Image (spheres, grey):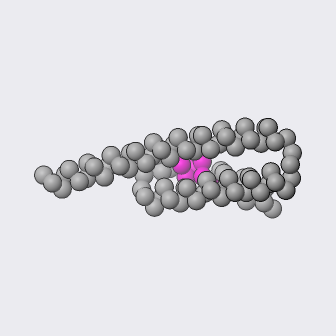
């Protein structure tokens, strides 16, 4: 059951990260951070309780975290740029 939750959280966070990249908002970023944390937590739980091919598991996890973190970082920068632009428009 934990594997299903892990895979669902990972796929949802990848899809949500893609959405957040194109339409960033603070709320959706926070939601995505939660999905990433859920994926990491369930992954660590599975490693501790069912140690199998740890190298392959860790490599997959590192690639996942790297990809999603990069997309979320870019989305966060886009959101900050939008906030600055909105603030500058209000000052005019």
The answer to whether one can see residue 4 in this image is no
In the image, what residue occupies the spot 32% across and 49% down? Answer: 82
| Number of dots carrying numbers | 0
35 displayed left or right of 30: right
23 displayed left or right of 85: right
The answer to whether one can see residue 88 in this image is yes
In the image, what residue occupies the spot 81% across and 42% down? Answer: 54
Task: Indicate the position of residue 92 as horizontal and vertical percent values.
Answer: 13, 52
Task: Indicate the position of residue 27 as horizontal and vertical percent values.
Answer: 45, 61
In the image, what residue occupies the spot 85% across and 41% down? Answer: 53
Question: Which segment is the magenta one?
Answer: 12-17
Task: Indicate the position of residue 69 as horizontal and vertical percent values.
Answer: 55, 44
- Location of residue 47 with respect to 55 vertically, above or below: below
State the image quarter where residue 61 is shown: top right
User: Which of the image's four quarters has the N terminus?
Assistant: bottom right
In the image, what residue occupies the spot 58% across and 59% down? Answer: 34
State the image quarter where residue 42 is shown: bottom right
Task: Indicate the position of residue 50 as horizontal and vertical percent values.
Answer: 86, 53
40 displayed left or right of 54: left
40 or 11, nearer to the observer: 40
The answer to whether residue 65 is magenta is no
21 or 59, nearer to the observer: 59
86 displayed left or right of 20: left
Q: Residue furthest left?
A: 92
Q: Residue furthest front?
A: 48
Predominant SS of the magenta segment: helix
């Amino acid at each position: 059951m934990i594997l299903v939750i892990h895979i669902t959280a990972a796929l949802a966070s990848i899809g949500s990260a893609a959405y957040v990249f194109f339409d960033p908002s603070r709320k959706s970023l926070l939601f995505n951070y939660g999905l990433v944390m859920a994926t990491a937590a369930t992954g660590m739980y599975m490693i501790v309780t069912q140690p199998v091919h740890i190298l392959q598991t860790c490599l997959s996890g590192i690639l996942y975290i790297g990809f999603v973190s990069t997309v979320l970082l870019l989305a966060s920068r886009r959101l900050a740029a939008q906030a600055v632009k909105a603030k500058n428009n209000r000052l005019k």
